[in-house]
Image: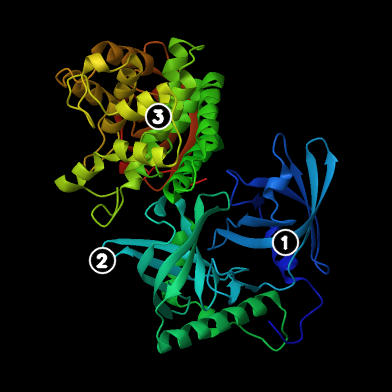
Amino acid sequence: MNGNSRATNLSARVIRSLTQYPYKLSVYSDSEDYPLEADILEIDQDSGLLILKVQLNDIDIERYSNEGKFSFDIEATKPMTSQSREVYSVYSAPTKILKTDTFCYRLECQLPVALSSSGSESEAGRSIRVPFVLGMHASVRLEVYRHSLIINGLIHNLSIGGCLLEVPIANSIALTVDQLIPGLTLEFPNGDTFFSKGKIRHIRPIGSQGYTAIGIQFLDLNAVQQEAIYKHVSESEREAAYRCGTNKKITNHSPLFITNNKDKEFRQSQGQGGKMKPTIQRGVAEIANQIQIGFLFIKAGTNFREKIFYDSADRLIELARRDRKALLYDLSFLLLEPEWVRHAVQVAGQLADMLITQDPHSPQIREAVVGALMHTLGKPLLISEDLPTLDTHMTPSQRKILKGHSTTLLKRLAALEWSPSPVCLDVLENANERLDGSGYPQGKSAGSLSTLVKTLSIIKAVNKLTHGRNGNPGRPPLDAYRWISGASGAYDKSILVEYIQHYGLYPIGSLAKFSGGYLAWIMEIDAKGIPMKVAVVKNLNFLDMNLSYILVADDFPQIGKLEEVVNPLNYGLSPLRV
């Protein structure tokens, strides 16, 4: 970005612009499980000095340093704009560390002067990377398996050798380092496109809202493609210079970034999102996100980040002990997560709740919950050309492949040299076994199964039946209980009775329909399982209007008699991603 540059540090300018919105700055290291959240104390836009404050307990700050340099993402939320989030990344900024208190550090980071930077060989070759800043955007379509799996994302930065993409973490489970991509299509706001084959060079979590950064190298470019990518990188650099105001000779947008009507319509639909925003605890949402991050490390095959899963289990147990009703209510809002994640977190949360109720001091609780959080991880490990997705109605051969998920997970954990505890292993090996020998993978029968596994199988069965799977709609709880009771000895009926007594016919977190045409989330039930408190969200006589108020039992006549539990997705009631 040359020509009449103003005396300012461009990285500092971009960071300053993002701090005008709600933001989060995360210091990260590829070798650490979690990023460190940091507060910005000062930004000098002339010198490029960024001063951060980091609070730590038992973590050595030096573990995040790479020879005196730190990397971080700053992620801003822009609720009133078409681009609802924007992330800017700084790589390897020279940093001076000052300890100011027992658990407090001051990081004095020297930001790079220019926005564009030299890419490393591990990313996209030794070429200039142009970050997409200040509202710049372009979409990406990855053809992961030829003609069978397409993943959409956004460009984070671009070079002549490749690009860094932002992809929802739920959509990235089919991707792995060194994977060849048969088709990669970039589409810019004016409608111009660029197509190439590609190879994934690295994957990491980015920001705090459930995204991954995917570094892709372009492969086998012919002369026409090389000319096109040089043009796109040059125009992207020009656009960034214009938006930053660093070159007085550039007085308007690059034609590449002038939005056409098609792009405007797409971005408007993306910006609107859903209409309902529940009071979901960040604890539950973050657990679902962390499980997916933990899976990415498992799939990468480098090492097993057990801290992620034990921290998540501890969080669920803490929530269950502190306010079990709030936990059960918030678990029900995991409707937008992938099925394998939603099922694992909800089952683990209910298992923690039941085990604590049975014996709050049981030494099994923590290891059992870890096992429950992990027991579906083998499913996304099986994604391949023969099983390109877990989200469609599967063929018999695909269902047969999927039944190998528990064995696949145990083999991967063994390859990572991680040995589960006996309790955790019991869950991982036997979660899908049945009393009558009809389960998998080994077809064990009642005498070989622990009480823990028998309890878990009831929780899993109810969860599967009350949520839609493989094209089948979810059943009301009463129907699910009847189906399990009549399943020819596959489940322990005494534990089923205990479950029904514990959660009732109208479980907390269910969506209830009342005779007055109202829909309400059940927040509390009494000892007999009868709702005592609900959150009213919809009057079906006025479909375009959303409601938000809480009623207790004495006020229920205002909305009529409770009729049934219904599927929230049938009424368009799905929560926004936090």
Looking at the image, tell me whether mark 1 or mark 3 is earlier in sequence order: 1
Distance from label 2 to label 3 (Cα)?
34 Å
Where is 81 relative to 222, above or below?
A: above
Residue beneath the point at 59% across and 61% down: 86
Tag 2 secondary structure: loop
Callout 3 amino acid: Ala
Task: Pick whichever of labels 2 and 1 is earlier in the sequence.
Answer: 1
Q: Inspect this view and state whether residue 281 appears.
A: no
Can residue 567 be seen here? yes
> Which percent across, then down, holds residue 138?
49, 71
Q: Which residue is mark 2?
A: 147
Indicate left or right for 443 with 514 as reference: left
Type of amino acid at the residue the image marks with label 2: His
Of residues 233 and 182, the one nearer the viewer is: 182
Q: Residue 436's x, y, as percent?
A: 17, 20
State how the image is colored. Answer: rainbow
The residue at the point 42 percent across, 14 percent down is 526
- Number of residues whose C-alpha sits closer than 10 Å to that of mark 2, classed few (under 14), some (14–19) or many (20 or more): few
Is residue 251 positioned above or below 472 on the image? below
Residue type beneath disc 1 = Ala
Report the front residue among 545 and 397.
397
Q: Which circle marks residue 372 in the picture?
A: 3
Which mark is drawn over residue 93?
A: 1
Q: Nearer the viewer, residue 397 or 358?
A: 397
Q: Of the residues under marks 2 and 3, which one precedes in the sequence?
A: 2
